Image (tube, grey):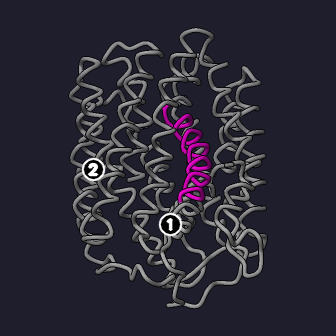
Amino acid sequence: MGLTGGVWMARVPSAKSQVHLSDGTLGIALLAVPVGLVLGAALAERLVDRVGSRVLCRICGVGSCVVLVTPGLAHTLPELMAGLFVIGVVGGTLDVSQNAQGVRVEAAYARPVMTSMHACYSLGAILGSLAGGGLAWAGVALFPSLAAIGVAGALIDGTAGRWLLPGKPDPGTREVSLGEASPAPAGTPLPKDSPDARRRVRRLVLALAVLGVCGLVGEGAAGDWSAVYLKDNLGTSAGLAALGFSAFSVTMTLGRGVGDRLIRRFGVVSVIRVGGLIATAGLGLALATPAPAVAIAGFTAFGAGLSIVVPQVFAAGGRADPFRPGSGLAKVVGLGYAGMAAGPAIIGLVANSIGLHLALLIPLALAAWIAVAAPALRAPQAGSQLADPSARATAAGIP
């Protein structure tokens, strides 16, 4: 998923040129992806707990590689939006199902590993963005670039899918609780699924979704707009512009590689809070300088700050509703993507009015909110007020 997504993000300027789009119309076209992601997450919510995440991962993993080529066939705005919408639907279903599989693996390990698994997505994004930048530098057209990576990705997914965990988790037990509190014993019976408990879960899901929006909009801004910003605003070449997202992806990978160890040592809230501050400072640096090298350094710090946010939000979403783990995860992912859906369009439309430079203040503000709302990720602890999901939501600013 990272490999194919990285190639697409590096070739967004090529798609913009091929379809003859302005910043504003490109933003509208990019809106089709998160809209499809929301629908794909809603579809996964109905299927993950019924058929299991393994089946969905295998189907949607290969499917996402097949539909990758659709933007390369587009020469009008509707054609591009249709292709991106299909990519979003398949990707949204894959995203929920593979994270549901990840929550099961993490529970089996009985220690934080979700962030490390997300590092593999970032590693793929690095390879994809470098490949996409190299193909752009060599003058390879958009369609053959996407087709080559799509074939490679389909072979990888088709091979790896057979090793996924079969079956479904038991919705009546909590397999593990991770974070600052001590893990709950595997198989511990959960309280009755009462209406009051359902309301508390909904509040926690909303709090997590807000954090998810902040992280996902930041990642989307780096992926969709970093190359455009470096090329159009700072005057770099297409190949050099792709290095902005490449640098972002490198630090995303490194941060996720060490994230689980940082969480075990310092606690998830402290790590996410510091990450939000680093992300804010990094994007601020990228926007404050006319020097491309310094701007790339800013996107590098931006990636480090955001690296752990989304994996921890998704992992917490998978544990938010212990009676329906797939449903809880899908709600967090879906609500996060629903909020993110407006991000590319708003950035593009604002860029048309005041310029892309000022429009990127939107993800800057959301990165700052991550540091404020980090308590939503605090793990339940016996005897603590924050063991109540509604208290955790209130601590994150959700009334």
The reply to whether the C-beta atoms of the residues labelled 1 and 2 are less than 8 Å apart is: no
Q: Hey, which quadrant is residue 273 in on the image?
A: bottom right
The residue located at (71%, 34%) in the rendering is 365
Secondary structure under the numbered disc 2 in the rendered image: helix
Amino acid type at circle 1 is Pro
The residue located at (47%, 84%) in the rendering is 173
Residue under label 1, please give it: 195
Q: Nearer the viewer, residue 64 or 231?
A: 64
Residue 303 x/y as whole percent: 63, 46
Residue under label 2, please give it: 64
Q: Nearer the viewer, residue 14 or 287?
A: 287
Q: Which residues are magenta?
A: 202-224
Compared to residue 14, the image places residue 201 above or below, namely below
Compared to residue 244, the image places residue 114 above or below, namely below
Front tag of 1 and 2: 1
Q: Is residue 40 left or right of residue 182?
A: left
Q: Assess whether residue 205 is covered by the magenta stretch.
A: yes
